[in-house]
Amino acid sequence: MSRPLPRLTLLWLNFNSMHNIALICESIDAMLAMDYPDFEVLLLDNASTDGSYEAFTAHLKGKVAGEKPSVRVIRTARNLGYTGGFDFGYAARDPASSYVAVVSDAAILSGDYARLLVGEMEKDPGIGGIQGIVSTLDGKRVDSAGVLIDKLMIPHHITRGEAVGTGTPTEVSFVEGTCPIYRVSALQAIMPGHLFYPQGFFQYLEDNLNGLLLWNKGYRCVSVPRVVARHAREAGGGGLLRTYCLWRNRTA
């Protein structure tokens, strides 16, 4: 008999997303409906001020019955950014979790998301981070299937924009931040006590750095050629802060 799949923590982060509240609630519903035997969901809010925190917590009422899955809502006192918000949630995870997933609030997970990806990691202890194919919201094209970094440190998203298809698992430089799963013991090896680099990376390229650090410690990052989520990229908008963080973090 195969051993039971280990506990998984899903971290999900909201910030001022009232303009996308229907998508936000659908994202929560998809996590709760996953076909996985042992997981918890931590719904994180980065001190939102637009009513989205109140809206998604109201939506949550009556959705969770019993203890499976375990759901907790955690609100920060101020906006800690993408990396800080997820790192805050990581510190609050169940210490029994062997894996942790980072889930965008604009991502709709498939029912077999966790079972498929954790199952692959259980077969190979050398995998530190994993993802599947993330399609566009309409399910027709690839939004993310892993990223390769060239010698100039420029990231290249493999098959982005192509029609969704199938293939074989691929080793990548890093797993992209929409909905990757990390092995907790691997994270402990690269940054004890942290999910992302604890200082400086307010948002963007934190997934790049995680991948490089994992490879440096002998772990691999893998992309599985199965669709595991749909995603509305840039649903939260861009602007000058996005541009500034991208160039600053790339330089760092």
Image (cartoon, rainbow, N blue to C red):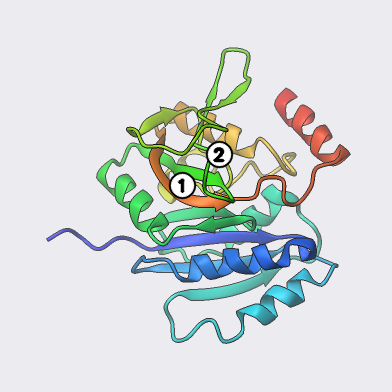
**Residue 4 as seen in the image, left or right of residue 31:** left
- Assign the N terminus to one quadrant of the image: bottom left
Residue 131, located in which quarter of the rendered image?
top left
Amino acid marked by disc 2: Glu
Residue at 40%, 32% in the rendered image: 220
Q: Position of residue 222 (x, y in %)?
A: 40, 35
In the image, 137 versus 75, the foreground residue is: 137
Mark found first going from the N terminus, 2 or 1: 2
Q: Is residue 56 left or right of residue 65?
A: right
- Left/right placement of residue 232 relative to residue 191 reads right
Disc 1 residue type (three-letter): Tyr
* Residue 3 drawn at (x, y percent): 20, 60
Query: Residue 156, relative to residue 207: is it above or below?
Result: above
Which residue occupies the foreground of this view, 59 or 39? 59
Q: Residue at x 49, y 35 (%)?
A: 163
- Please, what secondary structure does the residue beneath circle 2 have? loop
The correct choice, above or below, for 187 with respect to 20 in the image is above
Secondary structure, mark 1, is strand
Give the number of the disc on residue 182.
Answer: 1
Q: Which residue is mark 2?
A: 176
Marks 2 and 1, how far apart in space?
11 Å
User: Could you tell me which residue is drawn at 36 percent across and 65 percent down?
Assistant: 36
Q: If the image is split into quadrants, where does the C terminus sit? A: top right
